[in-house]
Amino acid sequence: MSSLGKDFEPLLTKEAPPAVDRMGLTWLIAAAIATIILWQVPAGDYILYPFTILATWFHEMGHGLMALLLGGQFRKLEIFGNGSGVASYAMSLSLAPIGPALVAAAGPMGPPIAGAALILASRSFKAANLSLKILGGFLLVSTIIWVRSLFGIVAIPLLGLIILGIALKAPRWVQGFTVQFLGVQACVSTYHQLDYLFSYSAGPLGLSDTAQIQQRLLLPYWFWGGLMAVASLVILVQSLRIAYRSR
């Protein structure tokens, strides 16, 4: 190799994260912190309402899809105007106690897992665009197959159409940011339901998800709530780290 080639070799091989990536990561972390703060003030729920509905959809779809994956039935999904929801499913008794425990855990873990997938998809425009199309399309399909509440029949396809509109019409940077922002919102939504994770009762719906896990796997519900809260944070941090690490 010539001396000229040696002089230029460091410039060709050393790759640092672009400045825009560092700025984007800082902004998204700030957005996650702001989200948690907004959840603590009365007006915050109104600002974040669409993301609350989407997180509820992720949660309930987690229950239903896990039941299907384990050979059970996903009968219907109901989402209500107050941001709550319920998934109706059936499980084979032969899978007890592990099967029902997995289905119960899939609800709280649905949003952070979906959020991590969206954040990772933001590493390339093609993947970000495809993920928005898949998410928007699946929101519409789920309405036809499973959603059976009046509010859900209106809200879920509306969210799907908005996301599809961004995928089809918005500039590339808007699509990339939307995927990342939705991913972070889904991950931190776990902390919007901390009281639920550490509750034994779900009110009129019966036992909470963590209480259902306690019934099957013996350890107390607060242990499972804490475990899922920690897991959600780890999933968010690791997905951001992978998405923003140097290529």
Image: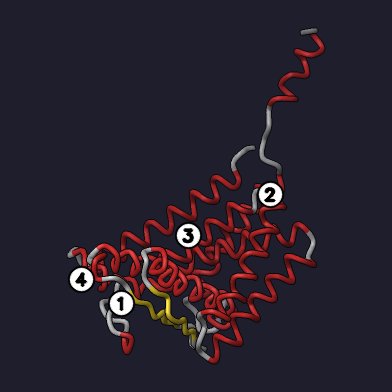
Image-based side of 49 in relation to 168, left or right: left
Q: Which of the two discs, 1 and 3, labels the residue nearer the N terminus?
A: 3
Q: Which residue is mark 4?
A: 215
- Residue type for callout 2: Ser
Q: CA distance from mark 2 to mark 1?
A: 38 Å
- Residue type for callout 1: Ser
Q: Residue furthest bottom?
A: 150
Contact check, label 4 and label 1, Cβ < 8 Å: no
Are there few (<14), some (14-19), or many (20+) residues within 10 Å of tag 1?
A: some
Residue drawn at x 71%, y 44% as measured from the top left: 19
Q: Which of the two discs, 4 and 1, labels the residue nearer the N terminus?
A: 1
Are there few (<14), some (14-19), or many (20+) residues within 10 Å of tag 2?
A: few
Image-based side of 216 in relation to 20, left or right: left
- Residue type for callout 3: Ile
Q: Which residue is mark 3?
A: 113
Q: CA distance from mark 3 to mark 2?
A: 19 Å
Local SS, label 3: helix
Q: Which of the two discs, 4 and 3, labels the residue nearer the N terminus?
A: 3
Quarter of the N terminus within the rendering: top right
Q: Which of the two discs, 3 and 2, labels the residue nearer the N terminus?
A: 3
Q: Which residue is mark 2?
A: 124
Q: Compared to 239, does 203 lie above or below? A: below
Contact check, label 1 and label 3, Cβ < 8 Å: no
Q: CA distance from mark 4 to mark 1?
A: 11 Å
Q: CA distance from mark 4 to mark 3?
A: 24 Å
Q: Nearer the viewer, residue 145 or 85?
A: 145
- Residue type for callout 4: Gln
Local SS, label 2: loop
Q: Which residue is mark 1?
A: 208
